[in-house]
Image (cartoon, rainbow, N blue to C red):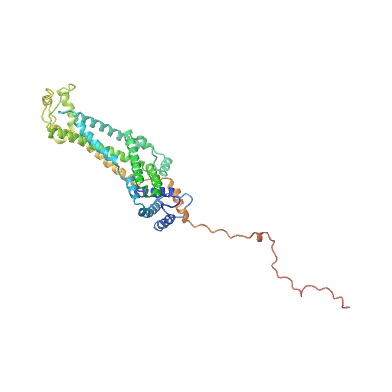
Amino acid sequence: MRQRPLQAVLLVHAIEQCDLDGDVLPMEDRAQATREALESRPLPATEAAPQIDANSQRFLALRADALLARLRVRSPGVDRVLATAGRSTGLDRAILLLGFALGVAISFAGGRRIDIFAYPLAGLVLWNLVVYVILIVRSFASAREPVSPALARSAASRPAPVRGPMARRDGFIRRWLAKLHANRVRARIDALIAQSIGFNAPLAPGLRRFALDWWEVGQPLFRVRAQRLLHLAAILAALGLMAGYAIRGWLLHQAAGWGSTFFGPISAHAALVTLYGAAAGISGIPVPSAHDIQALAWTSPTAGGGSAAQWVKLIALTALLYIVIPRLIGVIITTLDLWRRSLTMRAPPTFSGYLAAVLRPMTPRPAPPPAVSLASESSPPQDSSPPPDSSDSPRPPDSSRG
């Protein structure tokens, strides 16, 4: 099912499970919504536990929309609950802001002078390269993992487990972030329930049940959203790093140089070519020779170095090539994956019994067999032939006749 219809059916199902007396959704409204959905999407005769197929899913979605239209008149807050369950939270925006702030902060780690080796940039690039290798290895491992036909049929008949094989292959940060995002969505729904409980207290148990059901059913979406959020946070961290170095070089006019005792002029040139070689080849900004690099060495705590303009450009292009562009590709892939999953979500197995309960009042009952009188069964059969005529019966002889 699509995400929005599935959420609507989950919400109506949760309310009906908690509203047994019909205080929130009257029984007449439920029956009328069922009839309207059956007129739009007729279903064949069902058994005790009908299967959830495309027709039954559309029927449940139509019925849920009809009931939500009636419920929305009395409780407009249900739309806010559905919107909260399907969108990003304030935690996501806070993580993105934190990523940008972290990038700016580490760009100022060198103090009042810009180190041309840009160790914060080198650390970010190395970290992202490790992440790329892990993602590629996991994607190939997932593609080559054999799946038996029995396991495939079993997986198709039930929703994706919260801690399935794909969830176990996720990294710790991604699992933690997915759980944190899911808990935040559930907490936000609980906050909306607390705000509206004074206006419609009977609706609160159903909304809480919906929050729990969506927390379980929406785990695959939470995982993909967490992966996309990590890609976006890495992009913003790189942009913050680029902004920080630009501020230092172009606004604060800090000098660029190096003072490491680990490198000599030749080894320093080799290290800089390794770090900035791709950016230099694309932009046409050459990496200085070993002799020029030697001239950029710090001669004192406040003297030495040179202009930072070309180094700021090389730092920005390197971050763009190794972090921003690959992570942007990851954002596109995860967004498409999220869109695909939101269109093909699996209905929970409880929908089969729910569908049977919804259709049971609409199923005509067979007429009872005709009642048979007990007296008629116990009495012996009687002769239906007419009684003999008295004129035909023999008469006794008349004794007066002699």
| Residue 280 appearing in the image | no
Percent coordinates x, y for residue 156 in the rendering: 40, 44
The residue at the point 33 percent across, 38 percent down is: 180
Instruction: Give the x, y percent position of residue 382.
Output: 70, 64
**Relative to 9, does residue 275 appear above or below in the rendering?**
above
* Relative to 46, residue 215 above or below: above
Q: From the viewer's side, name the closer residue of 28 and 306.
A: 28
Counting every numbered tag in the picture gives: 0
Q: Give percent across and percent down for residue 11.
A: 38, 48
**On the image, which quarter does residue 131 sit in?**
top left
Task: Return the residue found at the far right.
Answer: 402
Residue 229, how many percent across, how many down? Answer: 28, 39
- Lateral position of residue 206 relative to residue 374, left or right: left
Quadrant occupied by the C terminus: bottom right
- Whether residue 329 is visible to the viewer of this picture, yes or no, is yes
Q: Residue furthest top?
A: 261
* Residue 32 position by quadrant: bottom left
Residue at figure coordinates x 30%, y 38% from the top left: 227
User: Viewer-proximal residue, 117 or 26?
Assistant: 26
* Identity of the residue drawn at 30% across and 35% down: 135
The structure residue drawn at horizontal position 43% and vertical position 46%, both measured from the top left corner, is: 350
Left-right relation of 177 to 158: left
